[in-house]
Image: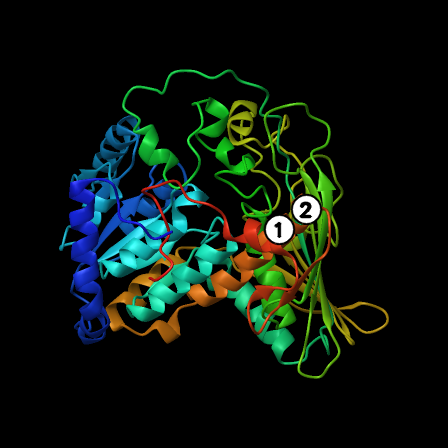
Amino acid sequence: MGQELNNPGRRSFLRTSAVAAASVATAASARKVLGANDRVRVAVIGLRGRGWDHVKGYHSLSNVEIAYFCDVDENVLSKRCGDAEKLGIAKPKTYTDVRKLLEDKNVDAVSIATPNHWHSLMGIWAAQAGKDIYIEKPCSHNWWEGRQLVRAVNKYKIICEHGSQCRSSAAIREAMDQMNGGLIGDVYMSRGLCYKWRASIGRVPEQAVPAGVDYDLWTGPAPMKPFTKNRFHYNWHWIWDTGNGDLGNQGIHELDLARWGLGVGLPNKITAIGGHFLFDDDQQTPNVLTAVYEFPTAGGRPKMMNFEVRGWMTNHEAGIGTPEFAGGEVPAAGLQQAKATPAKDKEKGLGPASDAPATIGNLYYGSKGYLAISGYDAYKSYLGDNNEPGPSKHAPAGNEHFLNFIECVRTRNAANLHAPIEEGYRSTTLVHLANASYRLGRTIHFDPDKEEVINDGEATELLKGTYRSPYVVPENV
């Protein structure tokens, strides 16, 4: 672990980073506080899907320059440069290799929207290079590298926002304040619901790597496997080498909110069961999963979290995902948009029907009632023995999360981040612990204070992962 890259140019990058690392902490803390009129020069890494949302998000903010595009697929780079021109964005400088991008001293911040298996390593390299970071969820592909990322961010005093945009939602922030203020009493249990139509990805043959794709760079830390479309765009989510299933895709948002509302950190006991039902295809991750977590508390009475992934037909619970929940308006992550076409649904893996009944949200149970969150922008509460309606709110989500990141970059005040990397790491750890329990077929016992598995070498090994040289997460960041 931690060996240098087997390439002279890349060794030069690491030597430069190592020399810089000794002074980055001082340099970052001494970095000037930017004024309202100072531009923040952002590089967006990974542009095909979620990364394009990053571009549109930053484009709407004042004095943010989207100065760099980075993608291992030259076809995507070319298309997005054209798309940027249509939006009125000056042509960004382009890179295919993130390591060369990070050598550019004019980059202020990187916005990482690559496949999961690249998140932590890119984040660590960016921190070592003195760049502020917006990193998509989940922040890591395995538990250990997520902790390494947190260490790097703290060591080099980098502003790092996790892509848990729900934490910037006005409705959800109000819901958390209500529960913290005792609205539903002692919150003893939370549930996360990730019921989303996902069509079969089928079986596809191996084929030649598409022209313009640097497949070695795309594969990065993962084992090198022959190219197939099911290991590439989007479907990498369902392959263990690169993704974490829907628990780490859509589900991480609801896991994060379930943990936040419960007011807990890391668990001490995790059990998960499930399977890949209905389809015979290339998918490796489960499309049905139930995970149960137990959390210790200072009072000695544990709290409990339940999380469910369902990838096909289901009911709505507590009205979550229905137009009625948000007063007749469809929540952002509730029902699929009525105007979506079957072709687009199929491309996104949503299932055969454009109005497929997704149920994405959370439930919290307390001594005085319960509270439900639907999608990213609405909550309702029900109080007393008769479930009388209590406070509620629907506030359509906007661009608050990217704005929060940029404001913290300007002020150098990490305390104002809505989703600091430490919180992203804790919630992402829940993903990895549940997936490990599912894959090993047993309960995992975890020490939340020492942050280590108890008496289970196989689980420890699985939670650390392996790396393909030269794309190695270092032992010492």
**Left or right of residue 462: residue 31:** left
Inspect this view and state whether residue 331 appears. Answer: no
Residue that label 1 marks: 458
The residue closer to the viewer here, 434 or 409, is 434
Question: In the rendered structure, which disc, 1 or 2, sits on the residue that comes first in sequence?
Answer: 2
Query: Which residue shows up at 55% across the image and 58% down it?
Result: 429
Q: Of the numbered discs in the image, which one, if any, rests on residue 440? A: 2
Amino acid found under the numbered disc labelled 1: Glu
Above or below, 130 against 57 in this view is: below
| Residue at 39% in and 52% down | 120
Neighbours of disc 1 within 10 Å: few (<14), some (14-19), many (20+): few
Give x and y (percent) for residue 384. Answer: 81, 74
Q: Amino acid at mark 2?
A: Leu
Give the quadrant of residue 281.
top right
Residue 308, given in percent of the width and then of the height, sits at: 70, 49
The answer to whether 145 is drawn above or below residue 153 in the figure is above
